[in-house]
């Protein structure tokens, strides 16, 4: 059930109307949302609804037992149980073929022919997201940052909540469970904000991400040898903005739908291409995912206080790379980003050792305009070029793309289209314009009469249909 489909719009309309009817009946409301969430997930593949239920049951049980355990050993046993089941299931579905293929290659390199059957397992959609969301609950209870809920229904709804189950944002239990136990007061402002977020998300997805994919990204990555280095470079930049528009568009829709239903979800992006370092980028990009790895993996293995901080950073970023996919291209993607973050940390340490003031993080407000612009452009180049590994299906394809970019400039075609270039230019401009302009526009829309608002929605829908290149799924569904 794609967000862009008529099926979803009808589904959302029914759920929204019934949810409004049940605002004063919390139990009926939660039952409705739980049934709706499982129906939504089963529309993608009904066979894996049991897997979603299993993850919920395992972590609900482990959370209760951890809280009830009187000794540290018992708490650790139940945590190990939850980790083993959750990560074991994730590894089985997501990485089994990668390890089997690696074993075959290793044995073959030793001169032995092995016939190991590659498992034909269909990757359950959203498995990385609902696995991490359910595990965050168990880990928070183990660390004393949250208390176990007594309602399995509430926890099952937290894990399966249909706006977030496929691609996040990865919501912590302490963010959503209290809203289930004590509903937020009904608010017209929240409904209006939700509608604006949904509309913004559809614009990002259909008017930007899908258009960039159709006109620039897909042709370039399908046959890079056929195109000029300039076209291939522009396609890399286009993919960088396609990925942002695609995932942030999904996040906007998810947060907007949640607001329409009376829930607040965390933001997931903070203008990531404003980053002036790779470290800064990861504080702005997909923050619910990067925050999970920071809090539960990086700090869990020692962070900057225990062990070698650089080893801990490398482990974390390689894990982030592997979370995105089972392939050496994703391992290398993590190594590149980990190396940049380690280099930036080493440089900060050298400045401190020499008695120099620490460089401010984030937007680097004290830097002059030119050095700040140089830092922003350098960071963007690193992010964009590393995305070749992200977009290519494997390491060999990524190497072929880079090789095509390095061929003589005159070789290959450059089939730029006015629509593709204009879309990329507008995407860049929108990303770097001051956010207050969008806030003013949203407030102006909300202050407009209902007739004007309805006309604007109708006009926007017609425009999106005109620009639509189909109902391409969101990129992060594959993760």
Image (cartoon, grey):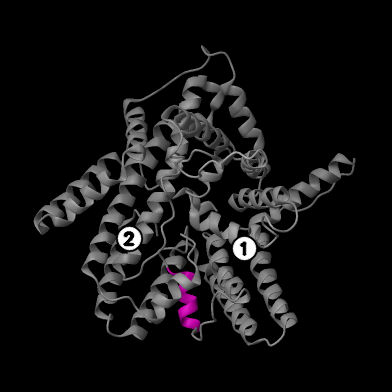
Q: Considering the numbered disc 1 on the image, is that residue within a helix, a strand or a loop?
A: helix
Which residue matches tag 2?
A: 256
Decide: few, some or many residues near mark 2? Use Cα within 10 Å; few <14, some 14-19, many ≥20: many
Return the x and y of residue 265 as percentages of the image width and height.
Answer: 40, 64
User: Outermost residue toward the right?
Assistant: 111
- Horizontal side of residue 367 vs 469, given as left or right: right
The secondary structure that most of the magenta stretch takes on is helix
Return the x and y of residue 325 as percentages of the image width and height.
Answer: 61, 49
- The answer to if 215 sits in the magenta stretch is no
Return the x and y of residue 296 as percentages of the image width and height.
Answer: 62, 63
Q: Tell us which disc is closer to us: 2 or 1.
A: 1
In the image, is residue 76 above or below residue 404? below
Please name whichever residue, 44 or 212, is drawn nearer the observer in this view of the structure: 212
Name the residue at 61% across, 40% down. Answer: 344
Q: Considering the numbered disc 2 on the image, is that residue within a helix, a strand or a loop?
A: helix
Please name whichever residue, 400 or 259, is drawn nearer the observer in this view of the structure: 259
- The span picked out in magenta is 152-161
Q: Quadrant of the N terminus?
A: bottom left
Name the residue at 53% across, 61% down. Answer: 129
User: Outermost residue toward the front?
Assistant: 355
Return the x and y of residue 80 as percentages of the image width and height.
Answer: 71, 73
- Horizontal side of residue 402 vs 72, given as left or right: left
Please name whichever residue, 81 or 317, is drawn nearer the observer in this view of the structure: 317
- Horizontal side of residue 5 vs 395, given as left or right: left
- Earlier in the chain: of badge 2 and badge 1, it is 2
Name the residue at 27% across, 46% down. Answer: 436
Residue 401 seen by the camera: yes
Which residue matches tag 1?
A: 296
Residue 124 seen by the camera: no
Asked whether the beta carbons under mark 2 and mark 1 sit within 8 Å of each other, the answer is no
- The answer to if 153 sits in the magenta stretch is yes
């Amino acid at each position: 059930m794609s967000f862009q489909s008529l099926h979803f719009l009808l589904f959302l309309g029914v759920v929204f109307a019934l949810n409004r009817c049940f605002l004063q009946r919390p139990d009926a409301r939660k039952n409705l949302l739980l049934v709706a969430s499982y129906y939504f997930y089963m529309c993608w593949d009904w066979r894996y609804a049991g897997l979603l239920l299993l993850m919920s049951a395992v972590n609900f049980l482990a959370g209760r037992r951890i809280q009830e355990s009187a000794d540290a050993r018992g708490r650790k046993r139940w945590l190990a149980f939850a980790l083993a089941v959750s990560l074991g299931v994730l590894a089985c579905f997501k990485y089994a073929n990668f390890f089997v293929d690696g074993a075959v290659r290793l044995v073959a390199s030793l001169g032995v022919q092995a016939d190991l059957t590659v498992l034909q397992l269909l990757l359950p959609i959203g498995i990385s997201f609902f696995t991490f969301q359910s595990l965050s609950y168990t880990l928070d209870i183990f660390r004393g940052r949250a208390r176990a809920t007594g309602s399995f229904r509430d926890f099952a709804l937290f894990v399966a909540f249909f706006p977030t189950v496929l691609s996040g944002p990865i919501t912590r239990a302490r963010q959503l469970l209290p809203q289930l136990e004590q509903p937020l007061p009904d608010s017209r402002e929240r409904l209006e904000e939700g509608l604006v977020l949904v509309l913004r998300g559809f614009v990002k997805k259909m008017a930007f991400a899908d258009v960039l994919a159709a006109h620039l990204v897909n042709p370039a990555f399908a046959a890079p040898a056929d195109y000029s280095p300039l076209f291939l470079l522009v396609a890399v930049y286009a993919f960088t903005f396609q990925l942002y528009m695609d995932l942030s568009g999904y996040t906007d829709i998810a947060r907007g739908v949640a607001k329409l239903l009376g829930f607040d979800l965390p933001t997931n992006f903070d203008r990531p291409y404003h980053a002036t370092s790779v470290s800064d980028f990861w504080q702005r990009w997909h923050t619910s995912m990067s925050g999970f790895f920071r809090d539960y993996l990086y700090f869990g293995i020692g962070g900057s206080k225990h062990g070698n901080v650089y080893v801990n950073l490398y482990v974390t970023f390689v894990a982030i790379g592997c979370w995105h996919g089972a392939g050496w291209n994703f391992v290398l993607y993590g190594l590149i980003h980990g190396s940049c973050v380690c280099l930036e940390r080493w440089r900060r340490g050298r400045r401190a050792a020499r008695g120099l003031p620490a460089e401010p993080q984030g937007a680097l407000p004290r830097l002059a305009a030119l050095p700040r612009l140089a830092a922003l452009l350098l960071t963007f180049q690193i992010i964009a070029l590393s995305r070749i590994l992200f977009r290519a299906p494997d390491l060999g394809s990524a190497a072929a793309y880079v090789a095509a970019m390095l061929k003589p400039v005159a070789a290959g075609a450059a089939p730029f289209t006015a629509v593709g270039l204009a879309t990329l230019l507008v995407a860049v401009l929108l990303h770097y314009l001051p956010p207050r302009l969008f806030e003013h526009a949203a407030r102006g829309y909300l202050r407009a009469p209902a007739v004007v608002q309805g006309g604007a929605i109708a006009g926007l829908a017609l425009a999106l249909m005109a620009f639509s290149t189909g109902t391409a799924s969101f990129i992060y569904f594959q993760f």
